[in-house]
Image (cartoon, rainbow, N blue to C red):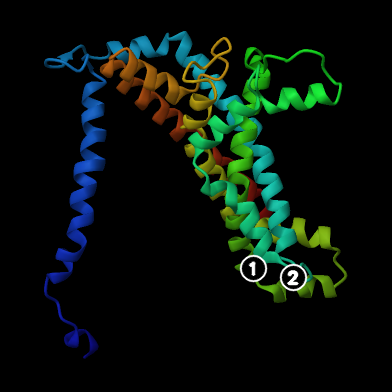
Amino acid sequence: MFSRSLRKDHYGYLFIAPFFIIFLIFGLYPILYSLYLSFTNWDGFGNPTLIGLENYQRLFGDFFFYKSLGNTLLIWGVSVIPQLTVSLVLAVILHEKFVKGKSLFRAVFFFPNIVTAASLGLLVALIFSWQTGSFNQLLMSLGFIQDPINWADKPMFMRILVSSILFWQYFGYSMIIYIAGLQGISRDLLEAAEIDGASKLKVFFHITLPLLKPIILFQIVTSIIGGMQIFDQPYTLTNGTGNPDNATLTSVMYLYETAFTRYQYGYGSAIAFGLFLVIVIFSILSFTLMNRRTKGESN
């Protein structure tokens, strides 16, 4: 009776059509066209020339691709592991009832996520500038150094600096996601454990953390997808050079340099799909490891 009263006309398709049309034009078509270009040699002029798998053969032996990928993984690991840990601890603290001003703290911690990545990279570049940077001036005024230090010539320091920017920008976002997950856990379950004599740490490790595993998996996968696409911060920090000694050259920076500076659009498309394959592999590994841990604990 209820189903008969529903109108079964097709006007609803008119309302959802704009999304699919825009997705097909600006989403699916560029992806498929880039896949086509990855099998061609094209400099942006004339017609692309089909060359088969030559771009992918070149990619597998490209030293700079592997170096950029290694830089990306290192920067991602140094930034994401502390980020997810610190944001989880802050989320648990701000989820407690006794904490006052929780809304203010959440807003303050989330604020760096609002600032654009390019602005942060440029700001940090000015702070750590060799001659006029405020960081060198501070160290000299405190007597720690006598002469300005050219921080841009220190490969490991620059990698850590990029990682620090990423950590500072996104830990507030991760904290908000964790808080949303914590709010989905029944307080009755936590209070029952505390009444039975479980300490705060035991409640966290044996109840809260296992129930947060879907959220943790979401954080890991999204951080992998975002981390493999690092571009703005190192690009603006090093003025697009990736120096010193290509230590901050990320995979997307190498893609950008190849396609839009050297005008090798075919090989640039191959780099893009190579990076896509790396993201898929790491995402599958994350799912597999989390599922194995879940099954092992349930057994």
- Residue 297, numbered circle: none
Q: Residue at x 62, y 67 (%)?
A: 183
Please say if 5 is above or below 248.
below
- Residue 185, numbered circle: 1
Q: Residue at x 66, y 38 (%)?
A: 81
Is 127 left or right of 4, judged from the image as shown?
A: right
Please say if 101 is above or below 296.
below
Amino acid at circle 1? Ile
Q: Position of residue 268 (x, y in %)?
A: 32, 19
Count of residue discs: 2
Query: Residue most toward the bottom?
Result: 1
Callout 2 touching callout 1 (CB < 8 Å): yes
Which is nearer the eye, 234 or 49? 234
The first of marks 2 and 1 along the sequence is: 1
Note whether residue 150 is visible. yes
Find residue 124 and report its image quarter. Answer: top right
State the separation of the CA atoms marked 2 and 1.
8 Å
Q: Residue at x 82, y 14 (%)?
A: 146
Q: Secondary structure at mark 1?
A: loop
Is 165 left or right of 268, judged from the image as shown?
A: right
- Residue 190, numbered circle: 2
Q: Position of residue 109 (x, y in %)?
A: 64, 52
Q: Residue at x 67, y 56 (%)?
A: 210
Note whether residue 216 is visible. no
Which is nearer the eye, 257 or 222? 257
Which is nearer the eye, 265 or 140? 140
Q: Position of residue 90 (x, y in %)?
A: 71, 54
Q: Considering the image in quadrants, where does the N terminus appear?
A: bottom left
Q: Position of residue 294 (x, y in %)?
A: 62, 51
